[in-house]
Amino acid sequence: MTRRRGGLQWTATSVLLGLCCTACHGWQSVTTPAGPQASRLDGLFWIFTAICAAIWVLVLLVLAGAMMRKRPAGAPFPSERSEKCASIVVGGAVAVSALVIVGLTLFSYLATHGLASGTADPLVIRVRGYQWWWEVTYVDAAADRSFLTANEIHLPVGRPVRIELAAPDVIHSFWAPNLMGKQDLIPGRDNAITFIADRPGVYREQCAEFCGLQHAHMAMLIVAESPTSFAAWRANQLADAVASAGAVQEEGGRVFAAKACASCHTIRGTSASGTLGPDLTHVGSRQTIAAGMLPTTRGSLAAWIADPQTIKPGNNMPMVSLSGSELNAVSAYLAALK
Ligand code: CUA
């Protein structure tokens, strides 16, 4: 009885958690597609769900029928007739199952076959997955029009985007369900995925392949915006860092350059040129830090710098020894890097 009650409580909690997550993260869903590729996969999802649900109901009905069937008293079992009948039913069920599997495979093939159509002249973005963050490079034929950022992607609505994926450490998987299917990032192999966002919005992407302790905290936002807004964002990202917001920020810049921060992070336009951690040139303009974990505020930046191993145990960011005023200045400086 106790075990059953525990099971019921567990089920109720799971359902509530599921509803809560859907309410808060409804924007990360296969069933609200925001582009032609995602729409195709959404259609495929519903076809599979409908057919599999129908089969499930049918199987339960047959099972219920078999359980309720009564054998006349004294009748031999199995009789020659019941054997013959069972052979026909099983043979028929096998044939129908084979047909359903072939049909679903065909649907799947047709849906995924057309994913690459209409994606000529894409915007090329290179994404490298690290334990546990995303490096993002906007590639342009002109080297001075290419730039590096991290943990947030912006793209123009209506234009095909080709994401070229690589991983230097372990296997990750790139997945923004509102926009595309999944594609793995595999060390030693170059993969790519092409898609179009046809609705402006902010879509959540997350790593979909277990890649270590902080796999669940390896996410980023994809901001799809009008071509004009995207061009403005791109122009701002191309520029070097500007952080002359005040005396505290200037002091923060000096501390950042003098401490270990600068040996792991790059801030273009300053002496900080480390390449181990994310590029922070415009970190204040991003919506989140720590690969989607915290909103970008001065407070969360300070918390992250003060104790990154409590917030995200196992990540490669070491604790840098800073005084209270230094921490205050560095977090103000980074928050101002818009
Ligand atoms: Cu990267 Cu999971």
Image (cartoon, rainbow, N blue to C red):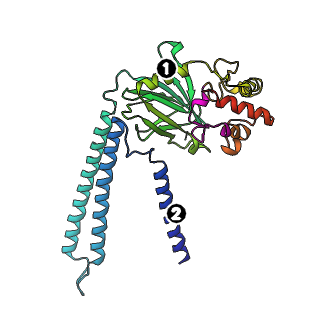
Q: Is mark 1 within 8 Å of ligand 1?
A: no
Describe residue 320's horizontal placement relative to residue 83 as left or right. Answer: right
- Write down the residue under mark 1: 139
Asked if residue 120 shows in the view, the reply is: yes
Residue 37: quarter of image: top left
Q: Position of residue 184 (x, y in %)?
A: 48, 36
Q: Who's the residue at 67% across and 26% down the image?
A: 265
Q: Who's the residue at 20% across and 69% down the image?
A: 85
Q: Nearer the viewer, residue 239 or 61?
A: 239
Residue 96: quarter of image: bottom left
| Classed neighbour count for the residue bearing mark 1: other residues with Cα under 10 Å, few (<14), some (14–19), many (≥20) | some
Describe residue 267's horizontal placement relative to residue 325 as left or right. Answer: left
- Compare marks 2 and 1 and give the one earlier in the sequence: 2
Q: Position of residue 291 (x, y in %)?
A: 58, 37
Compared to residue 230, the image places residue 328 above or below, namely: below
**SS at mark 1?**
loop
Cα–Cα span, label 2 and label 1:
46 Å
Q: What quarter of the picture does the C terminus occupy? A: top right
- Write down the residue under mark 2: 13
Q: Who's the residue at 39% across and 23% down the image?
A: 122
Q: Nearer the viewer, residue 85 or 290?
A: 290
Q: Position of residue 306 (x, y in %)?
A: 74, 39
Describe residue 114's horizontal placement relative to residue 291 as left or right. Answer: left
* Residue numbers of the magenta segment: 282-300
Q: Residue furthest front?
A: 246
